[in-house]
Amino acid sequence: MDDLARTALRTVGGIVGAGVAGVAYAALVERTWFTLRRFAVPALPPGSAPVRVLQVSDLHLTPGQAKKIAWVRSLAELEPDFVVNSGDNLAHLDAVAPLLRAMEPLLERPGAFVLGSNDYFGPVPKNPARYLTRRHAEVRSERSALPVGELVDGLRTGGWADLNNARAVVRMGDHDVELVGVDDPHVGYDRYDRVAGPAADDVTLTMGLVHAPYQRVLDAMVGDGASVVLAGHTHGGQLAVPLWGALVTNCDLDTRRAKGVSRWWPGAGYTGRGGGAAPSSAAPEHAAWLHVSAGLGTSPWAPVRFACRPEATLLTLVARDA
């Protein structure tokens, strides 16, 4: 074998070895390397006292995930003023009891929830290659039903407000806050027409809640005056490229907003990294604050994360500058 062939074999071996190491890291390390993100969001009127909102999303829980359950329970030590659960809690027929155990100490705080498609339907095997194609967002019809009624009853009994196609006024710290929520747009369960209308003028702010951040819902909520919108669903891309970010969002939201805080206003949507409307830096005064959680779980059929750690978020709403 000549030197050129040996060099080629070493190169191929190195690439294969790096790939195997990367998959092992994504499956065995990062997938359960939970982290808490913290953001300050200037959404309150000048002079307002801050309010702390804990958002948990996309647990995709199965009964044996003791580490995830314990970590979620520990979030109660943050003593948030309010808790938002933005859906996709379940990944197994027997996951409701473990999910309610995970939420048990958080249910002692005021809170609200919306549902995701994976609260209704169980996960199914998928070709991993579909993740990087336009077909990744399709919802397959043969999925099995999950005990969503049992989940909803448990969260309601715990005292949390059900915001699936509903509005409510809740107390967050020192503030009355109007919540407007929809059921999951990813499976077409959103009915914003049932809750549409201008933001209340006798509350500190109006906040939108949705699982999958489809542009039609974001536009409607912000167009009606919501100044903060919380969502999940994207998993932050789940498999991200270091120094680049998410490759997909599993909806029509642009990849720049796959996780974290950004600004949103009607017409702000991107077609992708190379085009679309103006960036967040050009946000008009009426733009809302959008937070998309990368979530805490994965499908049992795709149990990997790369450059996108599983997360919960503590959002501190603070006063805007006068």
Image (spheres, grey):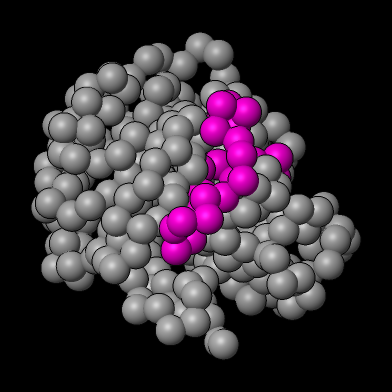
Left or right, 88 with respect to 128, comes to left
Q: Vertical placement of 14 versus 301: above or below? A: below
Magenta stretch?
A: 190-218
Q: Is residue 132 left or right of residue 22?
A: right
User: Between 161 and 202, which is closer to the camera in this rendering?
Assistant: 202
Q: Residue at x 70, y 32 (%)?
A: 135
> How many labels sit on residues?
0
Question: Is residue 214 shown in magenta?
Answer: yes
Report the residue at 17% width, 48% height from top: 107
Looking at the picture, does residue 98 appear above or below residue 5?
Answer: above
Q: Nearer the viewer, residue 286 or 229?
A: 286
Residue 303 in view (yes/no)? no
Identity of the residue furthest to the front in this view: 202
Q: Please identify the quarter of the rendering in which residue 225 is found.
A: bottom right
Pick whichever, 89 or 222, lies toward us: 222
Of residues 234 and 231, the one nearer the viewer is 231
Which quadrant is the N terminus positioned in? Answer: bottom right
Quadrant assignment for the C terminus: bottom right
x 70%, y 40%: residue:
216
User: Visible in this render: residue 205?
Assistant: yes
Expressed as whole percent of the image width and height from the top left, the position of residue 150 reads 22, 22
- Side (left or right) of 237 relative to 68: right
